Image (tube, helix red, strand yellow):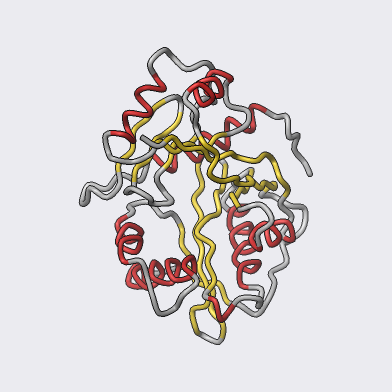
Amino acid sequence: MTFSTSDLTLARLLESAYAEWGRLQPSSNTNLVETQEIAGGCALFAGVASPMTHALGIGMSGKLPEGEFDRLEAFFHDRGSPCLIDLCPMADLSVIEQITLRRYKIIEFNNLMLRPAVTSTAIPLSGAATILPVPPHRHKEWCRLITQGFSGSTTEINEQELSLMESLPSLGDTFFAELDGIPAGGAAMSIHQDVAMLYGDATLPHFRGKGIQQALIRHRVQLAAEAGAQWVTACVIPGSGSHRNYERCGFSLFYMRVNVAREW
């Protein structure tokens, strides 16, 4: 590990990069996604119960001004959603105090994994998968594959989540992983403030266990290094297959985010 888990400056950089990614999401063509800069970060609404609906990077710039937390909650409340926050453990204590006073509930933990982008040797690719950028005419195909990969089904699909993904204006760089010319998985990457964020990793159920995700991770790390990024990061569920695959690709735990929510 080439970073300190007590590095507040680095934590602020990473949380700021995620918040910046969120700010890029509003679409001029649809009302599916709305964002607002707030509490030093970004609140993002993509529909009630959507996994994308949450606040990112809040409380990383110091004590919150009076009334700022009320404004944050109002953003979600006015749209009929619980207030959901992805909380960095190094956020200002004023955020912790408000979450405690308002009786938020923990709903999930996420490990923020990190590694340097630049390495002294070439990053070995793994598996037989071929990684290809997604051309514009295959964007819908990629969105469908990712939605199916997350759902664990190749026959049923959440049409609302599919429509949301197709409408996002800033998914970043997207990739297919193919086996023998057949799309087996996919993923995405965005670079902001010298931080490459990896996300959207999904493998179709019948292709799992073949090194698809590791190939996608290593390919994106290599691209991040070539693009001049300093850090590569991803958020994973603790103890999951993604957690293990990112560790196998040289990532270490920087900190655990606590996802909290307040129902109305």
Figure check: 40 above or below 42 = above
The location of residue 106, given as percent across then percent down, is: 55, 39
Q: Is residue 15 left or right of residue 125?
A: left
Q: Residue furthest bottom?
A: 180
Which residue corresponds to the image point at 55% horizontal and 34% vertical from the top-left? 87
Looking at the rendered structure, the number of numbered marks drawn on it comes to 0
Q: Give the quadrant of residue 135.
A: bottom left
Which residue corresponds to the image point at 61% horizontal and 53% vertical from the top-left? 237
Q: Residue furthest top?
A: 66
The location of residue 60, given as percent across then percent down, is: 54, 26
Q: Is residue 194 left or right of residue 164?
A: right
The location of residue 120, given as percent across then percent down, is: 77, 53
Q: Nearer the viewer, residue 241 or 171?
A: 241
Figure check: 54 above or below 213 = above
Which residue corresponds to the image point at 49% horizontal and 50% vertical from the top-left? 190
Q: Is residue 32 left or right of residue 16?
A: left
- Quarter holding the C terminus? top left
Q: Nearer the viewer, residue 49 or 125?
A: 49
The location of residue 164, given as percent across then percent down, is: 32, 57
- Quarter holding the N terminus? top right
